[in-house]
Image (cartoon, rainbow, N blue to C red):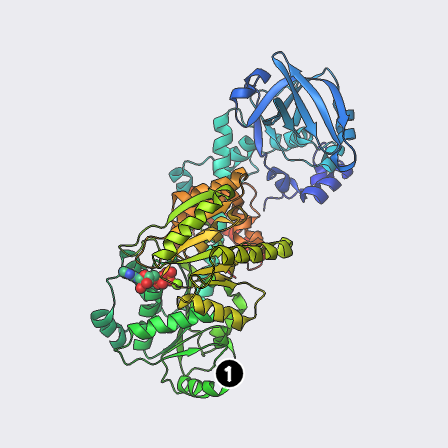
Amino acid sequence: MNSFLITPIEYLKGVGPQKADVLKKELRIFNFKDLLEYYPFRYIDRSKFNKVSELTSLHGHAQIKGKIIGFVESGMGRAKRLTAKFQDDTGMIDLVWFKGASWIKSSLKINEEILIYGRATNYKGRWNITHPEISSVNVNSSGFQPVYSSTETLNRHGLSSKGIEKIMQPLLEQLSGQIEELLPENILQEHRLLDREQAILKIHRPKTEADARNASLRLKFEELFFLQLELLVRKKITMQKSKGFVFDKVGEEFTDFYENHIPFELTGAQKRVLKEIRKDFATGHHMNRLLQGDVGSGKTLVALLSILLAIGNGFQTALIAPTEILATQHFESIKEMLAEMDVKVELLTGSVKKKARIPIHKALLSGETKILIGTHALLEDTVQFKNLGLVVIDEQHRFGVAQRAKMWKKNTIPPHILIMTATPIPRTLAMTFYGDLDVSVIDEMPPGRKDIITMHKYDASRLRMFGFMKEEIAKGRQVYIVYPLIMESETLDFNNLMDGYEAMSRSFPKPNYHVSIVHGKMKAEDKEFEMNRFVKGETQIMVATTVIEVGVNVPNASVMIIESAERFGLSQLHQLRGRVGRGAEQSYCILMTGDEIGKDSLKRMQTMVRTNDGFEISEVDLQLRGPGDLMGTQQSGLLDLKIANLAKDGHLVVLARDAAKQILSNDPTIEKEENKGIRSVLSDLLRTRPNWGRIS
Ligand code: ADP
Ligand code: MG
């Protein structure tokens, strides 16, 4: 790298040893480059102001010029706060701080004109802004002024947003000729991107809104481009290393099933995904494919067809489910579909007794068993295959990388892996987070499926819900009632669940009604027992915690009632709803919430009522929670982005990914002269970053 850019930050004009120290500690800014990449998070448009009198019609953020005419301190201890009376020529509002009162009071002068910015809210008829950003009005910059995020420590050392702006100036003035372009000309042209030097100048010192926008676009694109390029290259390296079995025949089993026994015509999406899998099977590389598809989209059939392909090529297969009930259901439905074919299918779960396992193990070792279905029990070392070629894992989120790795070891070359999940995540996130997996999507439901009708009801209308349950039960249907059980308030939740169970037992008394209960504190065998009573239709109502979330199939259950629904996340609500709507009957999902719920909770309920589409729901979830929460903190390394935002810049992720792919296909080893810049960044990334990007 150019030596100017790696000049230590203390050599910058205006940055003494003290400031340098704070910059290093607080912001990890060590050199000129780091400082240049400390981008502003917004701009003050010096040409646009709001008036206090406009606040009623304005939603959200306001920028007001005016002065503080007095301070009031109130409250004690943790409730202590500072209020400033702030006025312009049209009226007065309150500025409120809950912390840092004395520092703020001493740094703000009364009756001096200042500029405030923040979100205005109305509390009991008075407008106020909590923790506003404050800047002085008599700065000489016109147009757009950058705002950098700062901390109290930075502030104390003269590195408020203004302070950072000030040390940035001399750096920007020396910049000419120091910033190399990293992206090739054709990409710049195709996406109409500013050149790098211009972008860096303009992100810190835009003259217009368009300047700021173009600069940010260019830098976001670049950041996402390198992220995607790195992911693609890492994947390529892994692929080249990992040999896989070649399944190049269609085989008798597949053909026979497809021509004579398949229970229905495949949907377009199922056909497409099957094609993707067949392509993987033919490459000679190890397949690691994630199959995303909403609950009920028909993933099992795709799995079965893939299994038959493997068998037709002389291999054995395994299908792993997260619970015993699910494994049993898979076993039964697959046995039924293959009833007229000569393919040996076995079930192996934790409850298969030692003695009964002996013949199962034997038939696996001899190669006689072609499909082994089961739970984690399959992972045990005693379970040995003659020639395992494909492993299908249902419901990925219960399986860790370590468990996947165990399956790899069950043959000399790792078997192909197909992971199925009903928790869709937005495409742009999948591209980034499932770095080492290929992703297939079933985005089409089998024909004739009725959409589940979803309603949001407040606790106040509980009695009517009971009436509705009675009607449905009278028609012969079954009902789930799910309670939240969240660690922090476990005892309280548990009591709610029990109260709910008792209330149900009272309102739906024997002998006409039977109520089941399943929760996490029960022994596994008691859970299975209760669950089975419900599966067999011996009970009409199942009161449960989210333990029933995953995959259970009770086609006769047509009503899902979710209690305290405001406490569930969107994807969980969607998963729970997927427990109904599996039969021919119209199904319902009723979301019960407290009478007063927050804005985000309301949005979740409205989204559930509006759509049954898991992908649409995952997009809303992403907007509400952000990528970090959605994906769990484990992969947070991927979220260390300086300017792009995976939730908001989804379209750019796609463009950047395509551009990265294009580069790799034209110049697979990145050697061409025009890709020199790319090469230097990429080799740095591959060297310095640990191998993250693994699904778990
Ligand atoms: P999931 O994706 O949730 O695992 P399943 O594989 O259990 O979904 O399929 C849901 C239901 O849809 C099953 O009853 C299955 O038999 C049925 N199904 C699957 N594919 C089709 C199809 N192409 N046409 C009609 N019904 C189908
Ligand atoms: Mg399934």
- In the picture provided, is 332 more to the left or to the right than 108? left
Name the residue furthest top: 89
Is residue 269 at least partly visible in the picture?
yes
Figure quadrant, ligand 1 = bottom left
Locate residue 219, reporting x and y percent.
51, 39
Q: Nearer the viewer, residue 562 or 351?
A: 562
- Residue 601, above or below 147: below
Q: Nearer the viewer, residue 655 or 594?
A: 594
Locate residue 582, reporting x and y percent.
35, 59
Q: Nearer the viewer, residue 368 or 657?
A: 368
- In the picture provided, is 493 more to the left or to the right than 452? right
Locate residue 668, reporting x and y percent.
41, 56
Q: Nearer the viewer, residue 403 or 152?
A: 403
- Residue 136, above or below 417: above
**Dot 1: element:** loop
Q: Which quarter of the picture shows residue 71?
A: top right
Neighbours of disc 1 within 10 Å: few (<14), some (14-19), many (20+): few
- Residue 100, above or below 575: above
Residue under the image location 61 percent in, 22 percent down: 125
Q: Amino acid at mark 1?
A: Thr
Is residue 581 at least partly visible in the picture?
no
Image mark count: 1
Q: Is ligand 2 less than 8 Å from the beta carbon at label 1?
A: no
Residue under the image location 62 percent in, 25 percent down: 124
Name the residue furthest left: 259
Residue under the image location 56 percent in, 20 percent down: 55
Locate residue 26, reporting x and y percent.
70, 42
Q: Which residue is mark 1?
A: 382
